[in-house]
Image (tube, rainbow, N blue to C red):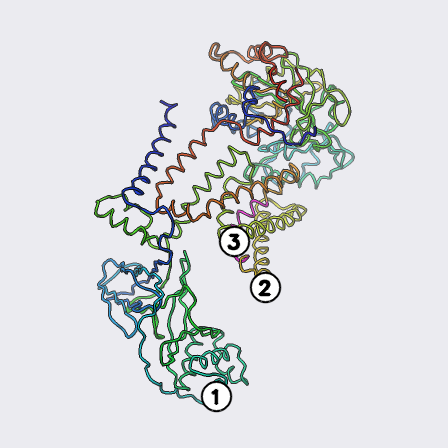
Amino acid sequence: MRRLHLPLLILLLLGTGLGIFYYKVTALDMPLQPGAMADTWLVEARIRYQPTGGATDVRLRIPERLPNYARLDENFVSRGYGLTTSQARDDRIAQWTSREPRGEQTLYYRTTLYRDGGDRDDEDYPGPVAPREWEEPFDSAAGALVQHARERSSGIRSFATVLTRDLASGDANGNASLFVMDGGDRELRTQTLIDLLSVARIPARAVTVIPLREGQRNIEPETWLEVHDTERWVPIHPLDGSVDYPENVVVWSHGDSPLLDIDNGSDEELRFSVTRSVQDAVGTAQRLGETMDTRILDFSPLELPLGTQNTYRVLLMVPLGAMIIVLLRNVVGIQTFGTFMPVLIALSFRETQLLAGIILFTLIVSLGLAVRFYLEHLRLLLVPRLAAVVSVVIMLMLALSILAHHLGLERALALSLFPMVILAMTIERMSVVWEEHGPADAISQGVGSLIVAAAAYGLMASRQLEHLLFVFPELLLVILAVTLLLGRYTGYRLTELFRFGRMQDALRRND
Amino acid sequence: MAGWWPRFVRPSTLRRQGILGMNARNASYIAEHNPRRHYPRVDNKRLTKQLATEAGLAVPGLIGVIHSHHQLRRLADTLQEQTEGFVIKPAHGAAGDGILVVTGWRGERMRKASGRMLDSNGLQDHISGILSGMYSLGGRPDAALIEERVQFSEVFTEVAHTGVPDIRTVVYRGYPVMAMLRLPTQESDGKANLHQGAVGTGIDLASGATLGGVQHNQPIRVHPDTEASLVDLAIPGWDKLMELAAGCRELSGLGYLGVDVVIDRHRGPLILELNARPGLAIQIANGQGLQPRLQAVDERVAKVSDEPPASRAAWAAAHFGCVPVGLGPVPHERHDD
């Protein structure tokens, strides 16, 4: 029985994992390829607040008409709340009400969008606006600015662009500088521009947009300026004056009133997260699953809130990386520093990309090593020395980030995602190996760690594998089974074939 | 051909030669025969020493144990009584790291084995490094042992002018199965680690005579530093050493064990330390695989259980000696080129 225990367990895991996988693929038609509809986005707004007592009233502005995007569906997650939506000029307002909520409250609004490229029917020209009243010296400065911009423009659109650029560069006879006390704040700048445009009687408004960035968990809404050129609303970037939205940007609400407004609540927080969604491709499968009354899909990570989903997309890749480590250490025989250090390094390579990641890692470890050798002379105790190495590593990371920023290497900024404590431990262990077993050993183990990290990254960065593990988490059982199987591998390691290969001369001696 | 040149050998060849691999060692021998609860007995050298003394096995004499920094202040003065020198080692050290050998005094200063001088500040720094866990696994605070220095047997003067020559014996289920003499060289910087360039020589378990050495996986017949012959060096007190090694099974409770022994000029073989995860290089030094011998022991234990250490050692000497039937180097391997 004891002999059969492990094989049976492995077979059980393999059977369960592959069985569920097979069922989901054949019977439920779950997609094996990622992003069947690549331009489908799931946008989630999460509201959190603390009720301060009494009936609360939460109002969130939600989109009504979206240029370039169509809304596939939307839903509201709010247990114990009454929900109404109402029209508010260009947007809608979702209003949640509750008599007496207790404890921290979380509400969600989710909508699925896809890019259809078509502009919605445009609103009519609202007519010229009344100029804003200014005090001196603003009044004459505004007049001069507007006059100066008008001389260099041919229409409403170019006028607004020129004016925005004037403010951005802050020149134009110093008149602009009176209006740019906002320090580059988009919202304030937009308001200033609306006011200035009103001097030329041009209708303008502020809009709040959400940039759609794959897998982002905390997206800052951005403010844009829209100017009506008598035919349509033209979006203008309030800081650099560029016209029209970039590719993946969705207009969320119009006007300058806040997105979120809460009665009898405090500490409110509004967060947006976006995923390039498999929801839609998987959606049909899920509907099918419902009609077949299967419980399997209740355990899918696709049911989780978006922010959590994005975390699990990464987490579900870790067992795969760990299995690669087992393979490379026990079957190939590569020596590494720390057992799972390469997985953590590989995770940070996801942000930096491979080449930059390897260069940065090598750079930090070698600089850290140099510092560590210097610290050796000071004869510090172990824990203070480790703490010193951690501090030095963080300072090195900061210095490299600043340097990279000045050189315009934005990719290198992802450096901050390196696990610095792990780096410090790596430096410490490497220096100990260096001293006790010589530089050859230390460098070969360091290179070994990098090779393993690169291999783990190669697999963990694959969108296909990520999709498979995320949509079919039961494949983790298969990974577990393979890991258990490798756990009983008692054959030779690949490196041993070379190690004992070299001793063949010695073996012959006694013949 | 150069020794570091990669040379590939088929797994089937290694299997025929009976070479034990790392995974097989870990899964089939260490995991199987070494209960984790007994590890402290070998990882803590102080405990090993105590257990060995209780069991009547010979170990280097203990001068003292240092647990805390305040014991350091007057240490140099007390140690001046040790005119023959002394050895300081971490209780939880591994692979010979952190061991300081002082061979004698010159006034206020100590002479290290390497010939360099050391003052009492240097000594305190070294010990406080040990106490803060510089050499212990995971950096846990440690204690420092002060031992009497072993007076090496004259046999080794020709082949070990630097460092500590020791004899590593692998003991499986109480039977010594293979042994090698490890000779530090200048290249290995006084350390007895084959990987760093120390010389390993296989030992005939029957007679205790060396079989010729290996350095960097290449056979050599003379010591690289002194040119002294490495063949047929007779290790004094060999039978006693075999019994000592066999007796470590009861003392440690471990079934797969490395026993490191030094030979003292006056006291004979002394247990230096035990190792729960002995390396595989011993196969290279002996030019033989461990696997057939381990299997022979398994068969023996299946037939005869509860043999006393002395008869286990005698059985091992008789069966794993130089010309045993069927256990020599594998003959067909000549055709492999």
What residue type is disc 2 on? His
- The image shows residue A119, relative to residue A272, as above or below, that is below
Chain containing mark 1:
A
| Pointer 2 residue | A406
Residue B77 rendering spot, x and y as whole percentages: 71, 35
Residue B210 rendering spot, x and y as whole percentages: 68, 17
Q: Is A52 part of what is drawn in magenta?
A: no
Q: In which quarter of the image is the C terminus of chain A?
A: top right
| Crowd class of label 2 (few under 14; some 14 to 19; many from 20; radius 10 Å) | few
- The image shows residue A406, relative to residue A421, as above or below, that is below
Which segment is the magenta one?
A: A412-427
Which residue occupies 54% across, 81% down?
A: A171
- The image shows residue B179, relative to residue A262, as above or below, that is above
Chain containing mark 3:
A
Looking at the picture, tell me which residue is in the foreground, B204 or B256. Answer: B204
- Which SS does the magenta portion mostly show? helix
Cα distance in 3D space between marks 1 and 2: 38 Å
| Pointer 1 residue | A147
